């Protein structure tokens, strides 16, 4: 158990004890959180916390949470750069109920037409939500997105300018994505970035425990919802955890890349 904890901590250096423990528990190696924490401290595996700038106190209004999957999605862009210094962008789309990252695009240039094409692809894969929350970026307020929303019957909800907390679900995902993926990898070219980011997205959806989902992965939570459990069973133990793999490695002859499918383009 100690060796496996060290292996997981090395594989996922930004995961603390509260995320590593459910992964060990899913493998049947440990039950007691206190034991995991004791070994975690003994092996000096603590994650260095990044201090955030303190903001003045203000009234906080909780964002309403949908009560089912595919009711509301959130979209936002993140940017990073290649080893050559050239910048690229990533579109993240998150289901606000299951917390799944349902789709991503990784490319140098992303337009409203490109976003609408991805949404059309997602419609065939899992259906569309009733509403999509976005900021007021030119891609989301474009004519292409307006026409798509009219055709698909999906409401576009724009947050107030300068208030990203109104789109908190995808902003929270963006923080995890940057901390555990973008900051931990060095991308040689766009294809390398697409493979690495898609591999991390699959890991996030199927393996990474989520505290607000009872330390289940988003996929485990979605399957529980489809079986009628939902958030009423969020504190229940993981069921059939052995059916969810703990790694996704594509054996294509390239040992340098652990990935599955290329990002949607």
Image: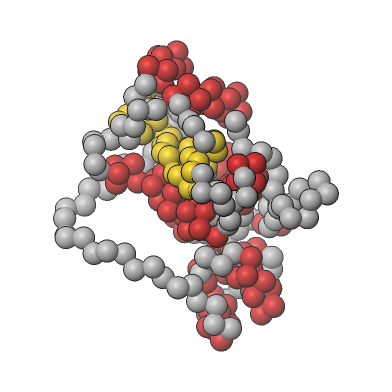
Which quadrant, please, contains the C terminus?
Answer: top right
For the image shown, how many numbered marks are present on the structure? 0
Against 182, residue 145 (above or below) is above
Dividing the picture into quadrants, the one containing residue 29 is: bottom right
Furthest residue in direction front, as rendered: 84
The residue at the point 25 percent across, 43 percent down is 163
Asked which colour scheme the image uses, the reply is secondary structure
The residue at the point 54 percent across, 55 percent down is 181
Front one among 136 and 170: 136
Q: Is residue 33 left or right of residue 73?
A: right
Front one among 70 and 165: 165
Query: Looking at the picture, how far across and down is residue 174, in whole percent?
Result: 44, 49
Q: Is residue 21 left or right of residue 212?
A: right
Query: Looking at the picture, how far across and down is residue 32, in whole percent?
Result: 57, 76
Query: Looking at the picture, how far across and down is residue 77, in whole percent?
Result: 43, 39
Dividing the picture into quadrants, the one containing residue 78 is: top left
- For the question of whether residue 137 can be seen, the reply is yes
Against 162, residue 118 (above or below) is above
Furthest residue in direction right, as rendered: 253
The residue at the point 62 percent across, 45 percent down is 189
Query: Looking at the picture, how far across and down is residue 148, in whole percent?
Result: 44, 17
The residue at the point 76 percent across, 48 percent down is 250
Which quadrant, please, contains the N terminus?
Answer: bottom right
Front one among 44 and 59: 44
Against 159, residue 130 (above or below) is above
Against 147, residue 49 (above or below) is below
- For the question of whether residue 104 can be seen, the reply is no
């Amino acid at each position: 158990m100690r060796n496996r904890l060290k292996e997981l901590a090395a594989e996922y250096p930004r995961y603390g004890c509260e995320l590593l423990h459910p992964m060990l528990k899913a493998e049947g190696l440990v039950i007691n959180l206190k034991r995991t924490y004791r070994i975690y401290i003994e092996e000096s595996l603590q994650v260095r916390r990044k201090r955030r700038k303190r903001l003045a106190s203000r009234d906080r209004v909780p964002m309403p949470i949908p009560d089912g999957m595919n009711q509301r999605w959130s979209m936002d862009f993140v940017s990073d750069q290649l080893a050559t210094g050239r910048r690229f962008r990533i579109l993240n789309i998150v289901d606000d109920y299951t917390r799944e990252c349902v789709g991503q695009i990784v490319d140098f240039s992303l337009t409203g037409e490109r976003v609408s094409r991805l949404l059309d692809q997602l419609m065939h894969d899992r259906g569309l939500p009733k509403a999509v929350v976005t900021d007021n970026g030119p891609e989301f307020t474009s004519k292409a997105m307006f026409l798509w929303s009219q055709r698909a019957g999906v409401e576009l909800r724009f947050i107030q300018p300068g208030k990203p907390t109104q789109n908190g679900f995808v902003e929270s995902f963006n923080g995890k994505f940057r901390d555990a993926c973008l900051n931990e990898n060095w991308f040689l070219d766009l294809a390398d970035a697409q493979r690495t980011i898609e591999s991390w997205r699959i890991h996030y959806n199927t393996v990474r425990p989520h505290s607000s989902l009872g330390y289940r992965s988003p996929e485990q939570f979605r399957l529980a919802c489809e079986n009628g459990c939902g958030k009423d069973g969020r504190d229940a133990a993981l069921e059939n955890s052995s059916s969810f793999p703990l790694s996704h490695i594509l054996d294509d002859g390239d040992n340098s890349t652990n990935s599955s499918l290329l990002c949607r383009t």
